[in-house]
């Protein structure tokens, strides 16, 4: 089972890296993306919840359950991918100044949900680890909805002038030079 989890995570990481590299290539050259619109207090509260439940709770569960190989197998790959996602997001947003940073959670959130589900299927966990895994499952399931429904705000799609025209919306020749 360890090999399957390792190969699965490496395979996902390679695929995610390739997709993000391709997206970066497709969006260059382009203007620097300064970042998302400022978020309100409810969304800030949600982000704090993500860091508390998504990172702090698994770290505590791992520290307390370190003696259990099953706990380590369930939480170490999860925490590593959490760190990789943050690294990818910061690189795409802060270093590249690219709007593709919004794609990173689109890739990693479903994978994280799969990781947690896979960890739940490993067998009987210690109580704290079991509670942590179910809390993570609910957190990431809800966060997929939150992230995907917030993409228009993140990408500042509401900043087009009211009289903006998008002729390609009415032109069936989307793949021709004159359609854009």
Image: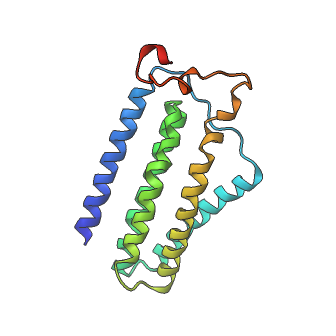
Name which quarter of the figure residue 5 lies in: bottom left
Q: Position of residue 140 (x, y in %)?
A: 53, 63
Q: Position of residue 100 (x, y in %)?
A: 49, 36
User: Is residue 74 positioned above or below 36 on the image?
Assistant: below
Extreme residue toward the left, this view:
3
Q: Position of residue 108 (x, y in %)?
A: 44, 53
Q: Position of residue 123 (x, y in %)?
A: 35, 83
User: Is residue 38 positioned above or below 64 on the image?
Assistant: above
Q: How many marks?
A: 0
Q: Is residue 63 left or right of residue 142?
A: left
| Nearer to me, 87 or 98 | 98
Residue found at x 33% / y 53%: 12
Residue found at x 48% / y 56%: 109
Quarter of the image for the N terminus: give it. bottom left
User: Is residue 145 positioned above or below 172 on the image?
Assistant: below
Residue found at x 48% / y 42%: 103
Q: Is residue 18 left or right of residue 159?
A: left
Extreme residue toward the top, this view:
178
Residue found at x 69% / y 34%: 158
- What colouring does the structure picture have? rainbow
Q: Is residue 167 left or right of residue 112?
A: right
Name which quarter of the figure residue 71 lies in: bottom left
């Amino acid at each position: 089972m360890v090999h399957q989890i390792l190969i699965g995570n490496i395979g996902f990481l390679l695929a995610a890296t390739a997709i993000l590299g391709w997206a970066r290539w497709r969006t260059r050259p382009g203007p620097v993306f300064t970042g998302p619109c400022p978020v309100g207090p409810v969304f800030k509260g949600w982000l704090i919840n993500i860091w508390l439940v998504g990172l702090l709770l698994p770290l505590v569960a791992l520290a307390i359950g370190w003696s259990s190989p099953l706990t380590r197998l369930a939480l170490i790959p999860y925490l590593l991918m959490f760190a990789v996602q943050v690294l990818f997001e910061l690189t795409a947003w802060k270093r590249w100044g690219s709007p593709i940073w919004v794609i990173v959670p689109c890739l990693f959130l479903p994978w994280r949900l799969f990781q947690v589900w896979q960890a739940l299927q490993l067998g009987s966990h210690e109580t704290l680890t079991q509670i942590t895994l179910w809390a993570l499952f609910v957190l990431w399931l809800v966060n997929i909805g939150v992230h995907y429904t917030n993409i228009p705000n993140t990408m500042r799609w509401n900043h087009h002038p009211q009289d903006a025209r998008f002729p390609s919306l009415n032109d069936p020749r989307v793949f021709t030079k004159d359609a854009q």
